[in-house]
């Protein structure tokens, strides 16, 4: 049902794009919008990972530059039955993360320096497992496409404001209709985009918790990231709000909007779902990531989780 609902929402987003095109240019405008949507999706399919990683200034790391981070991703990818994704780090104080790529064979996981420095190794494992779940579910392509179409709808609606609708008859929206179009079309796109994001986040939480073996690690990470996101602005995310749904927690600082307009399910509800899963799995007895001779119990970068050291990943 989740996949069917997601497909219907994506179809609705494309239909909204065509509807805006129709109001601006009639039947020919709708067809042009359809062609633009198809071309945009095709371009996004091949370039989605490069687009978003470049947008956030992410740089790739490997075992020589970030051995513990890359090693953790490799271990979790093995547990998930996934190819090893590329690993990127964003120089951003706000703790957050996202995954991108058109398929599991061409995927990337990106984390911020704030996430690396502020979370314990266990919490970091929970976050990475969540992102790997998105990759396994093929959510990464879907979420990038929805961001692209939503952004295109906003631009098309603004274009309609300047031209006041199609001029070949008297059925154009006019100035009032154009103003409404500029406001309501992006709003509709945002609501569809958020509905898709909410559906996929719950599924990724569930699978990610199963991959890592300890649902409460992810729950603890979500609470920490949520708290920091309210206090630490992510400048690039504020400039590109259409990509907010790609992160594990909404990176935008403006949360004074009703829950209807949230890009993610409430963290409280996500934690409650993870607590229920932990009870079902008997989480305390579940095998922990790193519970072997290669990964003794410690924080993410060679420190004890309980000491609270601020030493970063680069030594």
Image: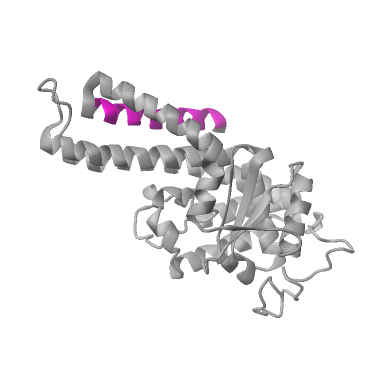
The residue at the point 27 percent across, 20 percent down is 28
For the image, the number of numbered tags is 0
In the rendered view, does 306 fall on the left or right side of 47? right
Percent position of residue 283, x then y: 75, 55
Looking at the picture, does residue 36 appear above or below residue 282?
above
The residue at the point 77 percent across, 71 percent down is 298
Q: Quadrant of the C terminus?
A: bottom right
Percent position of residue 123, x then y: 67, 63
Q: Does the magenta stretch include residue 95?
A: no
The foreground one among 204 and 242 is: 242
Q: Does the magenta stretch include residue 15?
A: yes
The residue at the point 59 percent across, 37 percent down is 102
Looking at the picture, does residue 112 appear above or below residue 47?
below
The foreground one among 234 and 284 is: 234
Q: In which quarter of the image is the N terminus?
A: top right
Residue ranking furthest to the right: 293
The residue at the point 38 percent across, 25 percent down is 35
Residue 197 seen by the camera: yes
Percent position of residue 235, x then y: 42, 63
- Image: magenta residue range: 3-22
């Amino acid at each position: 049902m989740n996949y069917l609902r997601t497909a219907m929402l994506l179809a609705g987003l494309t239909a909204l794009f065509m509807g805006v095109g129709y109001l601006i240019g009639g039947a020919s405008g709708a067809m042009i919008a359809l062609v633009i949507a198809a071309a945009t999706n095709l371009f996004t399919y091949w370039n989605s990972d490069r687009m978003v990683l470049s947008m956030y200034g992410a740089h790739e790391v490997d075992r020589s530059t970030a051995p513990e981070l890359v090693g953790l991703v490799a271990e979790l990818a093995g547990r998930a039955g996934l190819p090893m994704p590329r690993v990127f780090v964003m120089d951003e104080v706000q703790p957050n993360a996202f995954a991108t790529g058109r398929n599991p064979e061409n995927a990337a996981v990106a984390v911020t320096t704030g996430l690396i420095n502020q979370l314990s190794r266990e919490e970091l494992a929970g976050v990475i497992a969540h992102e790997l779940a998105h990759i396994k579910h093929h959510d990464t392509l879907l979420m990038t496409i929805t961001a692209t179409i939503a952004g295109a709808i906003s631009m098309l609606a603004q274009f309609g404001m300047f031209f006041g609708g199609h001029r070949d008859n008297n059925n154009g929206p006019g100035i009032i209709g154009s103003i409404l179009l500029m406001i309501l079309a992006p709003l509709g796109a945002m609501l569809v985009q958020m509905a898709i994001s909410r559906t996929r986040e719950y599924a990724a939480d569930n699978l990610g918790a199963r991959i890592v073996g300890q649902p409460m690690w992810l729950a603890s990470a979500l609470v920490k990231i949520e708290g920091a996101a309210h206090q630490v602005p992510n400048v690039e995310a504020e400039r590109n709000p259409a990509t907010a749904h790609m992160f594990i927690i909404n990176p935008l600082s403006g949360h004074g909007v009703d829950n209807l307009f949230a890009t993610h399910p409430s963290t409280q509800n996500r934690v409650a779902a993870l607590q229920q899963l932990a009870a079902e799995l008997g989480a305390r007895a579940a095998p922990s990531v790193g519970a072997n001779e290669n990964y003794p119990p410690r924080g993410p970068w060679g420190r004890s989780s309980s000491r609270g050291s601020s030493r970063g990943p680069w030594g």
